Amino acid sequence: MNRLLFVFLLTFPLLITAQSYDASLGLRLGTEIGATAQLRLPVVHKNFVAEGIIHQSLRRNEGSFTLLGKQHQNILSRRLNIFYGAGMHLGWTDEINTKTGEVYGRPFGIDGVLGAEATFAKINVSYDFKPAINFGGDAFPVSIQTAISVRYVIAKRNDIWDKKKERANNKERNQNRREREREKKRKQRIKEGKDPNGWKFWKKDGK
C-alpha cells in the first residue's frame, strides 16, 4: 500500500498540466446547473481565458448567460493554478414580485470569479466562487454562486493558436511594457531635476 502511494505521488504531477489547453467544454454543477465553455486568448495574455456559462438556478426559477474574462496564475508549478476575473450576465426569470404581482424583469449585472483548476489528461476540473450583482430585474441584488465544473479538452494548447506567433507576440508585448516603464522613469527623473540616465543635472548659476 505504501509503495502504491509512493508511486502515485511520483507520477501524479506528470498527469496534471495547468492551462494545457486552448478550448474546453463541459458541465457546471453547484448552486446552479448548466454548461460551460472556455477559450484561451493569448492575444490578451498567454494564460487569459474567456468563459461562457449558461445555467439554471437550483434555488429559484431563473437562469442566466454569463461571459467572464479570467486570468490564470500558476501556483507551486504549472501543474495547478488559480484564476480570478470578472464579467457580466443577462438572465431570465419567472419569479413573481410579491408587491406588484408581476413577473420580475430580465436580470442583468456584473460578476466576479475566483477559483482553482487542474487538467488531468483530457479532463479539466475546476471549482469557483462567483458573486453576481444585479442592477435590475431580480428580487435579490446580490447572488452568491459556487460550482464544480468538469470539462473535456477539445483543443490542446496551441492546437488553435500558433506557438511561434504566440511567443513572438508575448516577446513584443513584454518589450513594449519594459519600454513604457523606462520612459515613465525617465520622465520622472527629468521632472525631479535629474539626468534621464540617473545623474543629477549640474546645478544652475553655480549653486
Image (spheres, rainbow, N blue to C red):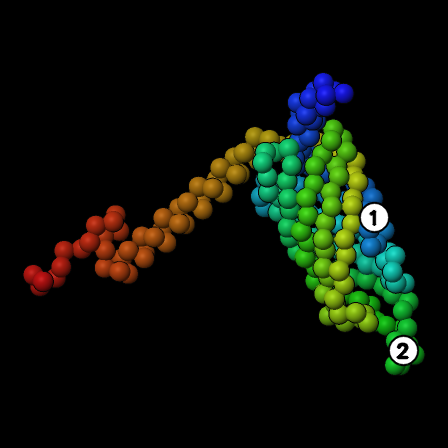
Q: Residue at x 68, y 48 (%)?
A: 115
- Farthest-out residue, front: 2
The residue under label 2 is 98
Q: Residue at x 70, y 62 (%)?
A: 110
What amino acid does circle 1 point to? Leu
Front-most of 113 and 183?
Answer: 113
Residue 97 locus on image (x, y percent): 88, 76
The residue under label 1 is 29
What amino acid does circle 2 point to? Thr
Secondary structure under badge 1? strand
Secondary structure under badge 2? loop
Which of the two labelled residues, at mark 1 and mark 2, occupies the earlier sequence position? 1
Q: Residue at x 7, y 61 (%)?
A: 206
Residue 102 locus on image (x, y percent): 91, 77
Front-most of 118 and 96?
Answer: 118
Front-most of 139 and 200?
Answer: 139
**132 displayed left or right of 96:** left
Residue 108 locus on image (x, y percent): 76, 65
For residue 15, above or below residue 59: above
- Quarter of the figure with residue 9: top right
